[in-house]
Amino acid sequence: MGARCPFLVLAAEACLHAPLDALGGYRLPVLIQPLYLKDALGSASAYADDTYRWVEAGAIRVTDP
């Protein structure tokens, strides 16, 4: 997580608010750790321990604070 990705959400139904330090384009990546698939993956269950990019929103341009 870098300077432009200051949050880690561990539960669904989250609403985040972030103060922006600069105008410009921001992206919202959604990363998942698919622990719920561990049993279904069988011998490949170690893959469920990794984090994967699931969705990335298009750029959100901030032009006025």
Image (cartoon, grey):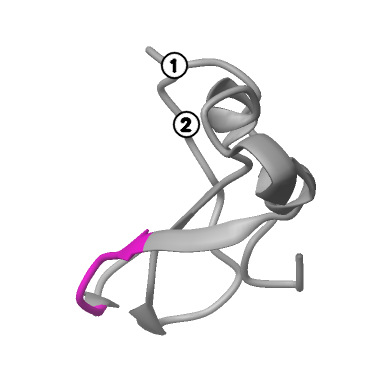
Element marked by disc 2? loop
Q: Which quarter of the picture shows residue 33?
A: top right
Q: Which residues are magenta?
A: 55-59
Marks 2 and 1 close (CB-CB < 8 Å): no
Mark number displayed over residue 16: 2
Tell me if residue 43 is in the magenta stretch: no
Q: Which residue shows up at 52% across the image and 28% down it?
A: 40
3 vs 24, nearest the viewer: 3
* Horizontal and vertical percent position of residue 54: 39, 58
23 lies above or below 7:
below
What amino acid does circle 1 point to? Ala
Q: Which quarter of the picture shows residue 59?
A: bottom left
Q: Which residue shows up at 38% across the image and 72% down it?
A: 27
What amino acid does circle 2 point to? Leu
Residue 11 relative to residue 56: left or right: right
17 lies above or below 12:
below
Residue 15 relative to residue 1: left or right: left
Q: Which residue shows up at 65% across the image and 23% down it?
A: 10
Residue 7 relative to residue 25: left or right: right
Q: Main secondary structure of the magenta part?
A: loop
Q: CA distance from mark 2 to mark 1?
A: 11 Å
Mark number displayed over residue 12: 1
